[in-house]
Image: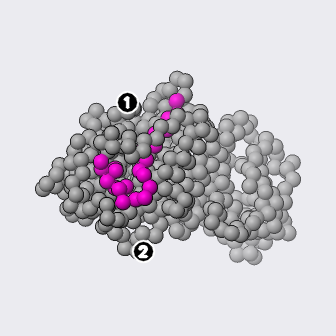
Amino acid sequence: MNIQLLNKNISDIKSDINIQFLTSNDLESSTYKELLNNAGFTAEQDSICFLHENRTLFCGCEDKTNDNIRSVTASMIKALKKTNYANAKIDILDMDIQSLVEGIVLGDYEYNTYKSAPKSSNLEEIIISSDSNNFQEIQSSFEEALIVANATCFTRDIVNTIPQDLNPETFAILAKKLADDNSLECNVLGETELKSQKMHAMLSVGRASIHDSQLIHLTYKPQNPKKTISLVGKGLTYDSGGLSLKPAASMVTMKMDKAGACAVLGIIKAVSELKLDIEVHVFIGAVENMIGGNAYKPDDVLISRDGKTIEVRNTDAEGRLVLADVLSYAQDTVKADYIFDFATLTGACMVALGQYTTGMMGHSNKLKHSFFQAANDSGELIGSLPFNKHLKKLLKSEIADISNVASKPYGGAITAGMFLDNFIKEENKDKWLHFDIAGSAYTESPWDCNVYGGTGAGVRFMTSFLKTIK
Ligand code: BES
Ligand code: ZN
Ligand code: ZN
């Protein structure tokens, strides 16, 4: 489906149907008030109503805030695809162009790779019209929003890909292709290199897999970068739990345990297409956590890349082991101004914040504050989970430097974040934030502009933050 922005008056545009956004106040003064009343339309948020004879589709919203526009636009596009209209037009009026684009592109998203006969739709084009004086500004926001929404769909596609097709080795191939397409540098470390890097925490997690673990490093280098950013992603292409095997019901959806890695790929894609003046390094630990005679075990002690020893008490807390080594490698390879990691790290994050909100952890309140703003601007949800010294003590081990799980179950998202903190160098403490996207990265029921499957969590709020960097 195509989406176009035209510098025209809406009445000069021909289309099969016109789309109008109405609040309950707008409804009161609408010329269609009576017809809409008869149809039972009250302009409730996310409701839609067709008046086919009048060639108009009405979208209900509580008010015209960005969140509400994005959400109802996503409902609208799904309804429109079920009709036989080929094109539709929207007068932008005073609505936010980014929210419209996101509602259309992200609400329209479908993942049909494994369907033998996907449902087809007649809808070919949405035309947005604006005859505003600052059309140039609207047009550049439109183009930026399209890049970010498409990068979000790219991330969703990879998250949704099944473990049969996407394993650590094919992940590296996919990353190389992205690098080729977007003129990025790409360096991949296979198991031989990981051994010479002494990345035994990461290697142990992947030992029982038939696929070799891979560390993928992509770089976007503009001419005069204002800042350098490192983005680290958890790329568990499948998490069976290992010998601490997950129960059957919890294992389903664990193809999404690579969503952190998919998010950082989507972000570097967006940054390179937006041509932002920041150098971005992506580091991905692509690993499969399986069972077998050579699997790592609860009771093992692993020597991590930076020398700390880790007692394994649960092989399902594998993401933090992979990230410990990748974070250590990232810090030694690139001197960055900021280091952000993305990971579907804990079920506990969903218990703490609900499934819609990304958990943010780290030391710098100033940096966290910037991300509340970025979340607001982008329409994603972020909640802060605070570290404290009492929880930190729960990671003590009797036989190694640290245990991979806390001795008490409460505050599990925070103790996982504090585990990672052990692998952040002193000089980087205030430059680092950890984002737990366990809940926000995947959904089995639609919400906001998200449909079944990967949501692309992280791509919108991170690009929003990066755009503000001076
Ligand atoms: N990948 C999971 C976390 C997860 C759970 C992500 C549900 C998305 C949905 C992670 O590797 C894991 O299994 N964590 C354990 C940690 C525990 C053993 C301390 C968990 O959350 O139960
Ligand atoms: Zn796990
Ligand atoms: Zn995991």
Looking at the picture, tell me which residue is in the foreground, 343 or 47: 343
Looking at the picture, tell me which residue is in the foreground, 373 or 361: 361
Q: Is mark 1 within 8 Å of ligand 3?
A: no
Quadrant of residue 71 in the image? bottom right
Q: CA distance from mark 2 to mark 1?
A: 42 Å
Name which residue type carries label 1: Lys
Quadrant (top left, top right, bottom left, bottom right) of the N terminus: bottom right
Kindly give the residue lying farthest to the top in the view shown.
224
Quadrant of residue 215 in the image? top left
Would residue 95 appear left or right of 205 to someone viewing this image? right
Crowding at dot 2, Cα within 10 Å, few <14 / some 14-19 / many 20+, comes out as few
Residue 144 visible at all = yes
Looking at the picture, tell me which residue is in the foreground, 7 or 197: 197
Would residue 272 appear left or right of 234 to someone viewing this image? right
The magenta segment = 200-221
Residue 216 painted magenta: yes
- The x and y percentages for residue 26 are 69, 60
Residue 58 painted magenta: no
Q: Which residue is at a point 46% across and 41% down the rendered structure image?
A: 188
Residue 468 visible at all = no
Q: Which dot marks residue 335?
A: 1
Mark earlier in primary sequence (2, 1): 2
Kindly give the residue lying farthest to the left in the view shown.
398
Quadrant of residue 239 in the image? bottom left
Crowding at dot 1, Cα within 10 Å, few <14 / some 14-19 / many 20+, comes out as few
Which residue bears the numbered disc 2?
A: 249
For mark 2, give the secondary structure: helix
Name which residue type carries label 2: Ala
Q: Which residue is at a point 37% across and 55% down the rendered structure image?
A: 206
- The x and y percentages for residue 351 are 36, 65
